[in-house]
Every structure is written in C-alpha cells, then in structure tokens.
C-alpha cells in the first residue's frame, strides 16, 4: 500500500481512460485494508481507486511501478483477484495512505466479476508503456512539424530495438532456466529464487523481471521440459514436467507420519527446500486429505489426517 498516492482522479495530457470496474477491494499483500468497496479505473498511465461512499477517498498507482501481474481464480466464498507485483516506491513519491508495507505486491479483489477483461486490458497497457512516450506541443509550425516527424521515427526505432533486445533476453533466459531447474532438489523453484539465481549467475548482464516472466509464460507453449505454475496461494514456481505431485504428496505424508507433526519451517529443513515450497507441499497434501492442520497463536502445524487415514 505504500506505493499508492492520494489523487484527485484527473488525467494529465496524453493520458487516456481505458476501463472501469466497480466492486473492487484492495489487499495489501495478504492483509485486508479499509479500501473495501470502490471503483477501479485503468488509464494508460495509472490505476485509480475511488471509494463508493466517500468520494474524497481517491488513490492512484502509477503503472510505471508495476513489475508484472497475475490472476488468482475465484473459489468457494472467494472472489477472483489480480495480483500486482510492484517495484519499490521512489523516494520522492507524493503522500499516500501508507508509508510502509511488508509486501511487494497488492491484490485487487473483484467482487462483481469483470476481472478477466480488466486483466487483459491491464496487460496491454503494461506492454504499451504509453506513460514513457513524450507528448508533442500543440500547434507546431512548419519547421516544428518536420522535427516532430523525426521524433516519431526515433520512437519507432527505439521500440523496434527494445523488442529485439527483449527477444534476445528471453532466449537467454530459456537457456539459463533449463540448466537451473535440472540442478534443483525436487525439480521445483519459486519464481523469486529463479530470478535471483539467474541474475547472480549472469553477473552484470541482468535480466529484468518482465523478461524473465515473459520467458516463463512461453515455456509450456514451446513444449520445453520446464513449466510455470501458480499455486492457489498465488505463489509462482517453475517445475520440471517430470515432477510428480503424487510422489510429493506420498513423501510428505510419510515424513509427517514419522515426525507425528511438522511446521513448514521443520519440513523445509528435513526436505532441503525453501520454507515457501515446504508450506505449499503441506497445503497440497492437506488439500487431497492427507493432512489436517492445527492453527494456533504459535503458528500453523500439520498432522496426519486420522479421520480419513485410520491405521489398521
């Protein structure tokens, strides 16, 4: 929430309205906020959220701060969401509803549907990056017109070069990803770990988060041995196609039965995976009925599901 700024909702020269959706709530990462019932407006330059009751409550989020977005499908008593991953707030950011956030992403909850069209339009605006394009002055003279034409040609060349560089970066990312996942325990890694490790190995020639995500989204389409997967919690991972969920579930059940009960941190140490992946393994095994949970002030602990799997 610390990336949002207070706004009057007005547009600037060169900015255009794209789409509006009512009944949208904002989550700061996994946490609910007081911004529960408002209209979400997408322009070529920013997201604008307007409270339906208090019209003076208007928030704006520049699209330049968005790294990438992903969809979270709806479920039982749960609305569909768009997860917006964000870069750090600039030091000169105008004041907003929060000065600090423990999360690097927000979630937009669409309680009156409309999330698919909004996600599509949102993605198009992020790709076009119209906020980076300069706005020519009104009423050019004859000489100015020629200069503006030259400026447009320069922008076109710049866009073509950027597309070429992106294609090259994606090709390099494919090569790095295949080598990296083959070496990983269990053939699965979180996307954040992949990003850090690939760029650490590449030294000064870094890949942007956008290039890496674009590469990951093309993996299955190109029939490569690695694919992108998004868990119900929103965690994105890369995993080998040979990765067997049934085998993971069986191993997790066996480990929990041996230890009587485990937390995600304990399973992480036992299985040699990150805490995030350990938690996803436990949640996946719980989902199919292999485990049950005990959630207390001390945290989340998982036990063998004796209700469904009674010993003989």
Image (cartoon, grey):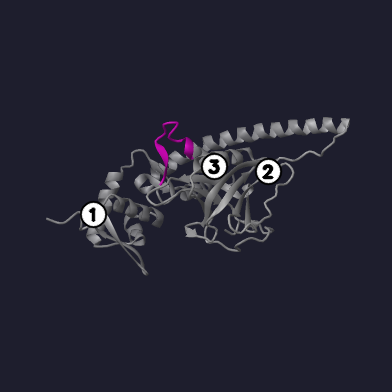
Choose the circle earlier in sequence order: 1 or 2. Answer: 2
Reply yes or no: does residue 222 show up in magenta.
yes
Label 1 vs label 3, nearer the camera: 3
Q: Give the residue pinned by disc 2.
A: 131
Residue at 41% x, 39% y is: 227
Relative side of 309 to 124, left or right: left
Q: Give the residue pinned by disc 3.
A: 118
Question: CA separation, marks 1 and 3?
Answer: 43 Å
Q: Is residue 263 above or below residue 23?
A: below
Helix, strand, or loop for circle 3? helix
Relative side of 180 to 63, left or right: left
Q: Position of residue 298 (x, y in %)?
A: 36, 69
Q: What stretch of residues is rendered in magenta?
A: 216-230
Q: Is residue 175 visible?
A: no
Reply yes or no: does residue 31 show up in magenta.
no
Q: Residue furthest bottom?
A: 297
Q: Residue furthest left?
A: 312
Choose the circle earlier in sequence order: 2 or 3. Answer: 3
Asked if marks 2 and 3 touch (Cβ < 8 Å), the reply is: no
Which of the image's four quarters has the C terminus? bottom left
Residue at 50% x, 40% y is: 116
Label 2 vs label 3, nearer the camera: 3
Question: CA separation, marks 2 and 3?
Answer: 18 Å
Q: Residues within 10 Å of mark 2 (few under 14, many from 20)?
A: some
Choose the circle earlier in sequence order: 1 or 3. Answer: 3
Residue at 62% x, 47% y is: 63
Which of the image's four quarters has the N terminus? bottom right
Q: Specify the quadrant of the image occupied by residue 42.
A: top right
Q: Give the residue pinned by disc 1.
A: 254
Q: Residues within 10 Å of mark 1 (few under 14, many from 20)?
A: some
């Amino acid at each position: 929430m610390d990336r949002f700024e207070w706004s009057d909702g007005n547009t600037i020269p060169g900015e255009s309205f794209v789409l509006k959706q009512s009944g949208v709530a904002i989550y700061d990462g996994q946490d609910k906020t007081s911004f529960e019932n408002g209209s979400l407006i997408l322009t070529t330059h920013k997201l604008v959220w307007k409270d339906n009751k208090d019209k003076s409550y208007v928030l704006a989020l520049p699209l330049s701060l968005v790294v990438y977005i992903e969809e979270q499908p709806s479920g039982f008593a749960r609305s569909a969401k768009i997860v917006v991953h964000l870069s750090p707030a600039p030091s000169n950011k105008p004041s907003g509803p929060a000065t600090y956030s423990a999360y690097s992403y927000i979630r937009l909850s669409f309680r009156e549907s409309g999330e698919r069209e909004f996600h599509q339009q949102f993605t198009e605006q992020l790709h076009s990056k119209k906020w980076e394009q300069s706005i020519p002055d009104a009423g050019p003279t004859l000489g100015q017109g020629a200069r503006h034409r030259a400026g447009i040609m320069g922008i076109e060349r710049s866009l073509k070069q950027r597309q070429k560089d992106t294609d090259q970066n994606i090709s390099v990312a494919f090569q790095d990803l295949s080598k990296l996942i083959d070496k990983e325990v269990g053939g699965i890694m979180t996307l954040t770990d992949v990003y850090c490790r690939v760029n650490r190995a590449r030294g000064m020639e870094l890949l942007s988060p956008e290039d890496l995500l674009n590469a990951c989204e093309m993996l299955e389409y190109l029939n490569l041995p690695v694919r992108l997967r998004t868990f119900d919690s929103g965690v994105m991972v890369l995993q080998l196609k040979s990765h067997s969920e049934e085998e993971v579930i069986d191993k997790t059940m066996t480990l929990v039965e041996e230890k009587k009960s485990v937390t995600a941190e304990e399973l992480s140490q036992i299985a040699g995976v990150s805490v995030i992946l350990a938690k996803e393994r436990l949640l996946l095994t719980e989902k199919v009925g292999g485990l049950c949970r005990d959630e207390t002030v001390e945290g989340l602990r998982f036990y063998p599901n004796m209700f469904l799997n009674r010993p003989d």
